[in-house]
Amino acid sequence: MIVPELRPWRAARPHVVRAAGAVRPRLARAARAAEPHLARFARATAPQLARVTRPKTWQYTAGAATAGLALAAGVVTAAGPWDSTGQRTAERDRAVALEHSGGADHGRGSGGSGTASGSPRPAPSAASVLAGLGGAAGEVPGGANAAPDGRALSEVLGPLMDDPALGARPAAAVVDLTTGKRLYGLRADAPLTPASTTKIATGVAALTALGPDHRLTTRTALEAGTGELVLVGGGDPTLTAREDARGLASLRVLAEKTAAALKKRDVREVTLSYDTTLYAGAEAHPIGVNENLAPVTALMADEARTDDSTSGPVTRVPDPAADAARSFAGFLKKHGITASAPGPSKATDRADTLATVSSPPLSALVERMMTNSDNDLAEALARHTALAAGEPADFDGVSAAVPARLAQLGLPVRGSRFHDGSGLDRTDRITAGLLTAMLAEAADPARPELRPVLTGLPVAGFTGTLSGRYTDGAAGLVRAKTGTLTGVNTLAGTTVSADGRLLAFAFLAGDTTDAWAAQTALDRLATTLAADVP
């Protein structure tokens, strides 16, 4: 996890250990224990990623305990460690200081991305931001006796899993990320409907296939001798037509750059077309028209939203590509280029590329997808994963490509089925064991490219889909991806145990009849892991 690091880890580690120990047995006590450490937290919280030997021996972070305690104490101001998008402000500042380029950030890209000046620069790699703890290989803070006790977990979680609000046959898995050992399992290998926890798989597969520095590019191309200008969709749903691009690829900037290139050719009037052929198959998701998702197309602006929102359900325009092309034509006109009413087409190999704009790096897109449970981004990244595998960029291609990528990592994909990238398809199936295995893989020091899957997880009580949850529980201590469909409630993520170990967990419930009660039961499980398990 990218965390503030303004002095060496050796100075931070004692405070992390003390803060982690203060988590038990109640959050109120943890809050009181955290207050004296707050000033030191801002200076000293270091990434707690131990470089230890494989196989299955790793530690991701105990620093989350310090952060969570400070937040739970209610003493972090509006200018505190998290900004409104869920990104730690110090992460961004440190990434800039180390790399002099963009960084993994929710909704913000590098200076070159979508701007008229310069080409996109690579995002800083996770390795340069995530410093490992020193010490001998395999060393674990707190010693061997610090490992959470599986029997104690079973005694505490077992009765909670029997809550009728979770349906007749819920499933669960808890893994110690220090050792990779499963500490608790209940029907952990039973494939169940995952809802939006599917996005964990989408993020892992996309980062594995494309790498964290990959960007999605939208371009314009001029067909030789015809005067036809083609707006070519690059499968970037974050392409924006808004005046303030906020670091995203800008349709306005693309128009400005395209107009300048046309004027150099003494062209002032064009026939405008748009190309969505990067994707194949139907644009309609199996759920049909839905406020949670735009038609899946390679060209859209602002996720085809009909208001100024950037996340959550909202009515979408019925033809996102045509709508984006019409906006583009208006921007061209402001720069002295007259364009015809746009229509669909396909850029030929003979067309000259005039201008491009690129998205923030994939690391940032995955974080945004995770924090906001962004369905449009999830479907886009799943299709790009399919393209990277040589599969068609449609739902069938996604079904083949995503599990294939997970299998390449040695993950337990047996019984899993992926029919989309977002988890809106009720026929998707994932096991609790696979969810925790993917989280463990993302925490592995040997897989720094997967770290955005973890850094993008919503923070309990503060960011994304968990911003309104855990307000009287483990606020700041739990980071997790939520999943909700009618009759389905899921939660998968990480938390720090009372002894400072990072745990990965997955809880899946089906056939639920009261969504609020099921959600409360899931939150109680995660809070118990954070505060009460010895």
Image: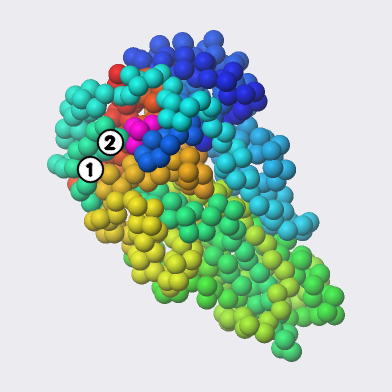
- Percent x, y of residue 165: 20, 36
* Mark 2 neighbour class, 10 Å CA radius: few under 14, some 14 to 19, many 20 or more: some
Q: Nearer the viewer, mark 1 or mark 2?
A: 2
- Percent x, y of residue 102: 67, 46
Q: How many marks?
A: 2
Q: Are marks 1 and 2 in contact (CB under 8 Å)?
A: yes
Q: Secondary structure at mark 1?
A: loop
Q: Which residue is tagged 2? A: 182
> What's the amino acid at mark 2?
Arg
Residue 188 numbered mark, or none: 1
Q: Nearer the viewer, residue 424 or 178?
A: 178
For the magenta stretch, what is the residue range? 176-180
Sequence order check, earlier mark of 1 and 2:
2
Is 52 magenta? The answer is no
> What's the amino acid at mark 1?
Ala
8 relative to 211 in the view: left or right: right
- Percent x, y of residue 528: 30, 24
- Quadrant in the picture for the C terminus: top left
* Mark 1 neighbour class, 10 Å CA radius: few under 14, some 14 to 19, many 20 or more: many
What residue is shown at x 50% (from left), y 19% (from top)? 16
What residue is shown at x 44% (from left), y 39% (from top)? 443
What residue is shown at x 66% (from left), y 69% (from top)? 219
